[in-house]
Image: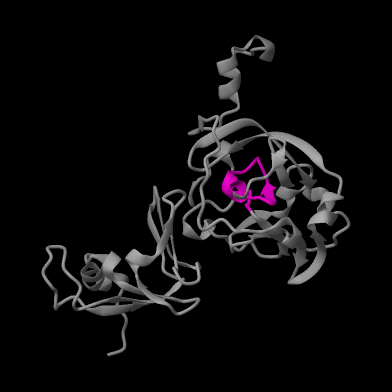
Amino acid sequence: MTEHRDGNSLAGALADIFAAEITSAQVQCRACGLATTLAQLLVYGPEPGYVGRCPGCAEHVLRVAKTPAGTWLDLGGSTSLLFSTMAPSPTGAASSARTGRVSS
Amino acid sequence: MVNVTRGFRSRRFATDDRLPPGQYLTDGFPVLSAGPTPAVPQDEWSFMVRNGGQVLRSWAWDEFMALDAQDITVDIHCVTRWSRLDTTWRGVAVDDLLADVDTAAEYVLARSYGGYTTNLPLEDLLDGKAWIAYEHDGEDLPPEHGGPARLLIPHLYLWKSAKWIKSLDLVEDDDPGFWETLGYHDYGDPWREQRYQGD
């Protein structure tokens, strides 16, 4: 089976990921390779947008801007996001169902 | 249509006349940064004009200070909706920096210390519309406002006036810069309220 589907088929998977408490996710800096949690990024903003920078090398790891068209998210400064199976859920209970690595 | 002689306008009307849509006036000078303020001592600062990766012109600080400078009074407009009127600067016209440069490029990518970039049409930097400014209000340009030197292109939103300017790269393609790749407008004319892509 090699036929592709449209992006709507990703909705369920992405909703699982981004419903997670993302600030506890581990992110790896594309420039220097340092892995930190998002909460450890050095964040500038909020205007014109948020810029999260690596605490090791100061390169931008992610950027977020809200415009009338929607929310722009740039993960180009990261190599991956790790949502740990041990990450607490929004209710505080450990989740075993949400796991995955997102590469950009 | 009513024509009003400028001399009989109230001060407020005259001020509003200079305020692009969606902007408000401020006497302050807010600082917006996308990263840490680069520490660039004047004796380590240099500025380049490049074309296709080749350095066409380069100035050290003392060399740049020896160029003909202009005193500039302009209104500035930030995409975050504040505007300041009659701001005063001193700097070198980009016309002088690009004089006699032979290029087929139609665009410029301004690059800054710290990695910031912004894209501009070359023609918007010429004919007395843009400067490399190193003084503000009669003082050395403070680091938080882009010192030692920044691009000043007041007819566009202020994110185009790149702080901590390092080079102007003449390029054939209009590749978007730091904010232009995150939903902000490619050109950024405050009078047409070109804040975001699609405006």
Q: How many marks?
A: 0
Residue pictured at 86% horizontal, 49% vertical: B67
**Residue B98 visible in this rendered orientation of the protein:** no
Pinpoint residue A102: horizontal percent, then vertical percent: 33, 77
Extreme residue toward the right, this view: B100
B93 lies above or below A34: above
A82 lies above or below B97: below
**Residue B51 visible in this rendered orientation of the protein:** yes
Judge whether residue B127 is colored magenta.
Answer: no
Please indicate whether residue A20 sits to the left or right of residue B5 in the image. Answer: left
Pinpoint residue B126: horizontal percent, then vertical percent: 77, 48
Give whichever of A16, B113 is nearer the camera.
Answer: B113
Please identify the quarter of the rendering in which residue B84 is found: top right
Please indicate whether residue B63 sits to the left or right of residue B89 in the image. Answer: right
B104 lies above or below A95: above
The quarter of the image holding the N terminus of chain B is: top right
Please indicate whether residue A54 sits to the left or right of residue A98 in the image. Answer: right
Give whichever of A84, B136 is nearer the camera.
Answer: B136
**Magenta stretch, residue numbers:** B144-163
Please identify the quarter of the rendering in which residue A18 is found: bottom left
Pinpoint residue A79: horizontal percent, then vertical percent: 42, 78
